[in-house]
Image: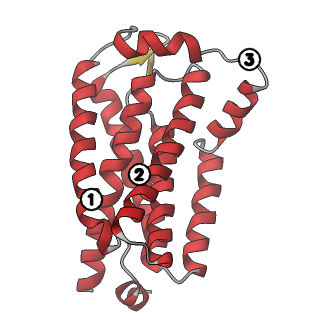
Amino acid sequence: MRQLVRTAPAALPAVLRAPLAMSAALATAVLVALGILHFRDSGLTGIDAALLPSIDGVQPPWRYLALIIDFGGEPVGSVILLALLAGVCFLARRVRTAVLTVLGVVVTVAVTTVLKPLVGRTIHGEFLSYPSGHTALATALALIIALLLTDRLGLGRAVAVALTLGLALVAGVAMGWAEVALGAHYPTDAAGGFCAALAAVPGTARVLDRVADRL
C-alpha cells in the first residue's frame, strides 16, 4: 500500500495547485469573517433575513427533493458516497485520490465540528449551526471528484479551475438549499460550510502528496 501511494499520481494535480491555494486562502478569510460576524448569534440579520423566508419550509414535492439531498450528508448516506467515490478512485488507479476521499472529508468535517462550538451560533434556540457540516461534506466530495476528473482527462488550467469550482458550487448550493429548506441552517451557515471545504480539501491533498513523495 505504501509503495502504491508513493508511485500513484498526485492527489492535487499540478495545474490546480496555485489556483486552489488562492481560492483556499480566500475561503478561509470568508469562513473566519462570517464566524466573527455571527459569533454567539441566534437571529436573522442581513442576507439571512432576506433569503431564509423564501426558502425555509418548502412543501412537497420540493421537500422530498431536499430530504433526498440531505440524506447524502447523514451518517449512512455519507458513508455510502465515500465508499463509492473511493472505490471509483481505486478502480481508476488513483490511490492518492482514494485516500484523499477519506482524509479530505474527515478534515473538512473536523473543521466544521470544531468551529460550531467556537462560533456558538444557534438555530431554533439550541442547535449549533455555523458552519453547515452537510454543505461542507457535499462540497468536499465534489472537489475530490473534480480533482479525479482533472487528472484522468488531462485538463488544462482554465478548464480544470472552471470544472473544480463549478462542481463545488453546484454541490454546495444544492446541499445548502436543502439544509435551509429543511430549517436546519441559515443561508450563511451553508456559505461557511462551502468555504470550509474549499479551504480544507486542497490543503489536505497537498499535505498528502508531500508525505507520499517522501515515503
Residue 136 vs residue 82: left or right? Answer: left
Q: Which mark is residue 165?
A: 2
- Image quadrant where residue 111 sits: top left
Q: In the rendered view, would you say 58 is above or below 115? A: above
Is 76 in front, or is 178? 178
Secondary structure of residue under mark 3: loop
Q: Give me the residue at 54% from left, 10% from top.
A: 53
Q: Which of marks 3 and 1 is in front?
A: 1
Residue 152 vs residue 112: left or right? Answer: right
Q: Name the residue under label 3.
A: 59
Secondary structure of residue under mark 1: helix
Q: Give me the residue at 38% from left, 11% from top.
A: 42
Residue 166 is at least partly visible in this image = yes
Q: Name the residue under label 1.
A: 19
Q: Where is residue 64 in the image (x, y as percent from the top left)?
A: 75, 30
Q: Quadrant of the N terminus?
A: bottom left
Q: Where is residue 188 in the image (x, y as percent from the top left)?
A: 39, 25
Q: Which label's residue is closer to the chain start, 3 or 1?
A: 1
Q: Residue 35 carries which label?
A: none
Residue 129 is at least partly visible in this image = no
Q: Give me the residue at 27% from left, 86% from top.
A: 215
Q: What residue type is labelled 1?
A: Pro
